[in-house]
Image: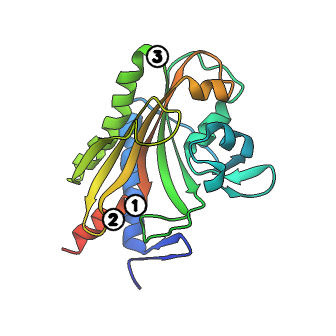
Amino acid sequence: MNKYFTKDGIYYLDYELSKLEFDLFREFEDMLLEKGFKYLSLPSAGSWDVIEKQEVVTKEYSLGIDERQALFGSAEQAFLEYFQNSKVDKELYLFSINECFRNEQKLEGLQRLREFKKLEQFCFCKKENADTAFNELLNNSIEFLERHNIEYRVVDKTKEDPGYHLKKYDIEVKTKKYGWMETHSCTYFGEEQTKRLNIKGGLHTISNTGIASPRILIPFIERQKK
């Protein structure tokens, strides 16, 4: 049996790669817990209303369940639904691990799928602390890549990518098959999301891909083939 295969945008791993995936998520999780982040168990589905208000993973790229609910494309949406119509008046550093779903039409190996697993960092912060919080979340992803000697670069996508973000940096890793491949995004939304979801307290939000699999496995697989 191959170490992995994909079928209609769904991925399957053998025992060795499954353990690697498990260990990498556990490592990142332990790192965040040591730094004082709080874990929040979140679902992989929720209301169309939140998807439309979040407007990052748009309705077009969402997989519907019925007229009320859809599968989430990111735990960021689940964070927003969890705190919707509530008050958050103190800074929070959070993370969650869930299955994510995208209505991808152009499927490509382990790089582009319809289902994947992701650890999402999410932060409520004061406006004056936004730069510090942004760098902290970004640097957690960088620290993880450096631990594993994965070549990377940070790309400022603030003006290039569409959306209501105020700041957005991508991390790309170098692969043989795909060249420079985006594996992480760190995005500062100001107070736009809290306004859209009626989250009172005046705080700003930042979202960051801590680790997303199976995309993150590609440089490890290529390394094993040497």
Is residue 106 shown above or below 100? below
Q: Residue at x 36, y 58 (%)?
A: 216
Residue lying furthest bottom:
1
Is residue 220 shown above or below 209? below
Q: Position of residue 153 (x, y in %)?
A: 25, 46
Contact, mark 2 vs mark 1 (Cβ under 8 Å): yes
The residue labelled by disc 1 is 215
The residue labelled by disc 2 is 218
> Which one is earlier in the sequence, the residue at label 2 or at label 3?
3
Three-letter code, disc 2: Ile
> Which one is earlier in the sequence, the residue at label 1 or at label 3?
3
Q: Residue at x 35, y 22 (%)?
A: 132
The residue labelled by disc 3 is 127
Determine which quarter of the picture holds residue 24. bottom left
Q: Residue at x 65, y 30 (%)?
A: 83
Q: Classify mark 2: residues with Cα within 10 Å, few (<14), some (14-19) or many (20+).
A: many
Per the model, the C-alpha gap separating discs 2 and 3 is 36 Å
Per the model, the C-alpha gap separating discs 1 and 3 is 32 Å
* SS state under label 2: helix
Determine which quarter of the picture holds residue 140. top left
Q: Position of residue 66 (x, y in %)?
A: 79, 56
